[in-house]
Structures are given as structure tokens and as C-alpha cells.
Amino acid sequence: MTQSTELHHLQNDQQKVELKIQKEIRRNEDFLVLWIQDALDKKTSYGDLEESQFRNLVRVADTTDSPEVVKNFLRYQVGRDKKWGRGKDSLAERIVLDIGMEGKGGKVLELAHQIAKSTTSTDTKKFGWN
């Protein structure tokens, strides 16, 4: 097998795994929406949030693969004003806890691990994903 053919097979395998992951994410989007709605229903946990604050959060989340970047953005926003709430019962802290951290769960991190397990093949190690 030539190096070009081997590279093509590797890229094809990677695309298949990526498609499986995307499919599983779409299949689980309802969970994410329900978690968000549940958090937003507790109106005492945040202040006068505007659409722009949500857009900024989505923009940050869309431009990074790091959950820590998203969590730090929220913590920074909490320090700026009360729109995301304050303290343990704030919307910002709820989102941070829902995202989770290694070894401490969190709904989003646990869902990501489930998706990874359901889509992981022996080839994913070739791509540096495990």
C-alpha cells in the first residue's frame, strides 16, 4: 500500500468517526436543551440577562474546544456584574457545574464521555482523541 493510499484510508476512517460523533451529539441535543431550560426557569439565580450576554457565551463556546475557556468566561462575567447571578446558586455557577470537570462529573462532561464511548473505535487512538 502506498503512503498516499494509507493516508487516504486514515482520513476516511477519521471522517467516519467524526460523523458518528456528530450524529450522537445531535441525538442528545434534547438533553442539553432541557438542562438549559431547567437552569433558566430558576429566575432568582440570575439578574437582568440580555440577549447579547447569551450571544457572547455562545460565541465563546463556538470558538473553543475547551470547556475550561467557557467556564472561565462565565466566571469573568460574574466578576463584572450581577447579570449571571452571584455565588453558589447563580446561573453561571450552575452552568459551570453542569459542564463539570475531570473526575467530578458534570452533566455535559458525562454526556461527552458517553458519546465518546459509543463512537470510539480502535482507530480513534490514531487521531489523538483518546
Image: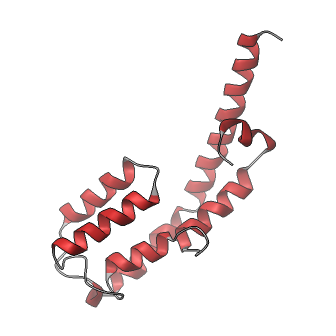
Q: Is residue 123 left or right of residue 89?
A: right
The extreme right residue here reads 1
- Residue 36 appears in the figure: no
In the image, residue 24 above or below residue 36:
above
Q: Position of residue 113 (x, y in %)?
A: 65, 62
Residue 56: quarter of image: bottom left
Q: Position of residue 26 (x, y in %)?
A: 55, 55
Residue 47: quarter of image: bottom left
Q: How many marks?
A: 0
Q: Position of residue 3 (x, y in %)?
A: 74, 12
Q: Position of residue 80 (x, y in %)?
A: 16, 71
Q: Is residue 120 left or right of residue 65?
A: right
- Residue 45 appears in the figure: yes
Q: Is residue 67 left or right of residue 47?
A: right
Residue 25: quarter of image: bottom right
Q: Is residue 115 left or right of residue 122?
A: left
Q: Residue at x 61, y 69 (%)?
A: 110
Q: Looking at the figure, which quarter contains the N terminus?
A: top right
Q: Residue at x 52, y 67 (%)?
A: 30
Q: Residue at x 17, y 69 (%)?
A: 50
In the image, residue 86 above or below residue 119:
below
In the image, residue 39 above or below residue 99:
below
Q: Residue at x 46, y 54 (%)?
A: 66
